[in-house]
Image: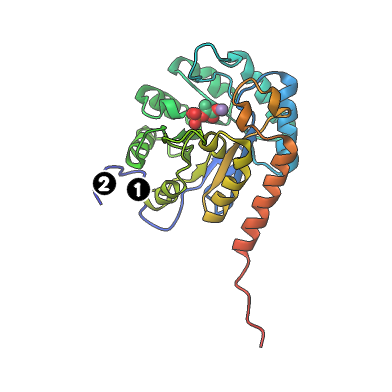
Amino acid sequence: MSATYRLAQRLSDTTSIVRAGAATFGDGGFTLVGGPCAIESASQIRLAAEGVRDAGGAMLRGGAYKPRTSPYDFQGVGDEGLPLIAEAGARTGLPVVVEALAVDQMPLVAAYVDMIQIGARNMQNVPLLRAAAATGLPILLKRGPSATLDELLLAAEYVLLEGNPRVVLCERGIRGFDKHTRNVCDLGGALRLRELTHLPVILDPSHASGRRSLVEPLTLAAAAAGLDGAIVEVHPQPERALSDADQAIDLADFARLAARVRAVREVLEAPALAVVT
Ligand code: PEP
Ligand code: MN
């Protein structure tokens, strides 16, 4: 192959392990990240964190600055969300991931989080990629809604070239033409990514589908297919969520999802049945 992504390309069977606090991606397990689309209040993020921890989730997510399509929609609580999610993470022992939207947010975000998310809209924002890389923290890099796999890998290459090898890629759905799902969940593309790169690859079934009814089955598909994890929008009261309410699942549903993921992985990891004669 042409070595266009020299540092990201897969050269062996070994997937790189990326650690973010106590969470690990790429070690052969299925790492579940859960939490609300947006941090809304101390009690909301704390309840979400407790639910994610009790379900066996490995990491807490929550947006402080929200990249909304409409400027009239809730934009996130901003800087003041960072201590709220850091505190919820510390109480529950969960590492936290938060999206940074701008270079000048990077020092503050980096002071509070274990992993920095670069969102779909910013996948090719080179100054942002470089600033995130320079923090030395692990980066969760989401695929742009119309980005090819090569473009995603080249975006990751910017982080790697900066001397930061800690990148996890995330398929979050690409733009399609049908209104019944928010995006098209490109599971095949995510699996092809795992062939192309040694970096861990996870799925965001929430943005990929936009519908809470599809979050669990898509996560189970990702777990069965051998991806490295999923990042799921979970809210203590989904119907009251200030952003992405239609795709948020509640804590009980997240617990069920996590249990089913474990069941799927156990089946896959079980040794082949011996034939008893
Ligand atoms: C999010 O994770 O809440 C988000 C805005 O995701 P994306 O960048 O994939 O749209
Ligand atoms: Mn969201």
Residue 9 is marked as 1
For residue 129, side relative to residue 20 (left or right): left
Q: Residue at point 45% right, 55% down?
A: 14
Residue 262 position (above or below residue 19): below
Marks 2 and 1 in Cβ contact (< 8 Å): yes
* Amino acid found under the numbered disc labelled 2: Ala
Mark 1 neighbour density, 10 Å: few (under 14) some (14–19) many (20 or more):
many
Q: Estimate the spatial distance between the alpha carbons at disc 2 and disc 1, rounded to whole Å.
A: 8 Å
Judged from the image, the secondary structure of the residue bearing numbered disc 2 is loop
| 51 up-or-down from 6: above or below | above
In the image, is the residue at mark 2 within 8 Å of ligand 1 by its beta carbon? no
> Quick one: SS at disc 1?
loop
Residue found farthest to the bottom: 277
Q: Position of residue 267 (x, y in %)?
A: 63, 62
Question: What is the quadrant of the C terminus in the image?
Answer: bottom right
Where residue 276 sits: x, y (%)? 67, 84
Instruction: Judge left or right: residue 19 versus residue 55.
Output: left
Ligand 2 location (quadrant):
top right
Q: Front-most of 238 and 149?
A: 238
Q: Amino acid at mark 1?
A: Gln
Q: Which mark is residue 30?
A: none
In the rendered structure, the answer to whether residue 137 lies left or right of residue 82 reads left
Q: Which residue has dot 2 on it?
A: 3
Above-or-below relation of 93 to 26: above
